[in-house]
Image: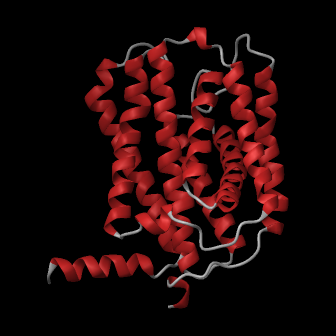
Amino acid sequence: MSDVTRGSRWVDFWERGTWWKAVVAAVGYLVLYQLAGIADGRVLGNLVDGPGPLSSETNVVVYLLVPLLVGAVVLVAFVGSVRWTRPLFGAQPVPRRGWMWIAVALTAAPIVLRLFGIEYGEYSGGVIALTFLSGLLIGFTEELLTRGIAVKILRSAGHSERGVAVISSLLFALLHSANLLSGQAPVTVLLTMVYAFGFGMMMYLVLRATGNLLWPILLHGLTDPTTILATGGIDTAHTGAESPLLPFAGIFSLVFIVAAVPAIILVRGRARTEGALR
């Protein structure tokens, strides 16, 4: 069998969208990301200096940056192999709706509050810079996977946009179930997954409102590092003195969850894609 034939079959497999292929893509990425983290810990774990990912520049690199770089390379390679760069980063095959800009405002507001509320003096300049770089990679990888790859697969399968929004957000929530492996309490992980679903719905609306995947990548990429620096860790709560702006930013976590309900009701329509016609 020639390389061309194998390549064509690989592309055709992913072009024929079905919901379970979106699950396969998400689970496959999650497994590879976790394996990268394990390998990273074994190779570079001796360089860790102090507890937590923000204790030093080295910790940020080991805990966050390296696994994310591996994940980014894997996703970029996958997108290239199925020739989806233009479909994913080009114009969306569905019309924009004005009300969806509400999600842009809702997700931008806590970012601004945290940018002004973070106690920057608690961290070195290197830790801050590397955390923002890691955050942008989080936005790139998770949005490319869930609002890019998964959304395209689901649209190719012929799902309505409501189904696309809900399933892709559920997959985004699924990614956060991996926090169980780091020893987090099941209740904490469950609450994180509920928040992730709400935030995922907001990111879907940002994708629809702006018409380009780059905007959810950017907003997501600023949400995570500002949250990490504001709370002092990953999926943790701040325990010391904090700016009065940060509690207001935290309220938006609940707002996302509540706003997801009317969003599910209001999202309608169906994308016109080649895959949906097969």
The one nearer the camera, 115 or 233, is 115
Residue 120 seen by the camera = yes
The one nearer the camera, 143 or 47, is 143
Q: Is 195 left or right of 145, judged from the image as shown?
A: right
Q: Quadrant of the N terminus?
A: bottom left
State the image coordinates of residue 257 (x, y, percent, origin top left). Answer: 78, 49
Q: Which residue shows up at 35% across the image and 77% down it?
A: 11
The one nearer the camera, 102 or 179, is 102
Q: Which residue shows up at 52% across the image and 61% down it?
A: 148
Q: Is 4 left or right of 115, judged from the image as shown?
A: left
Q: Which residue shows up at 32% across the image and 58% down it?
A: 77
Q: How is the image coloured?
A: secondary structure
State the image coordinates of residue 3 (x, y, percent, origin top left). Answer: 17, 77
Q: Eyeballing the image, is 262 above or below 111? A: below
Q: Which residue shows up at 82% across the image and 44% down it?
A: 255
Q: Eyeballing the image, is 241 above or below 112? A: above
Q: Which residue is farthest bottom?
A: 278
* The quarter of the displayed image where residue 212 is located: bottom right
State the image coordinates of residue 242 (x, y, percent, origin top left). Answer: 73, 14
Q: Eyeballing the image, is 185 above or below 128? A: below
Residue 53 seen by the camera = no
Q: Is 232 left or right of 27, judged from the image as shown?
A: right
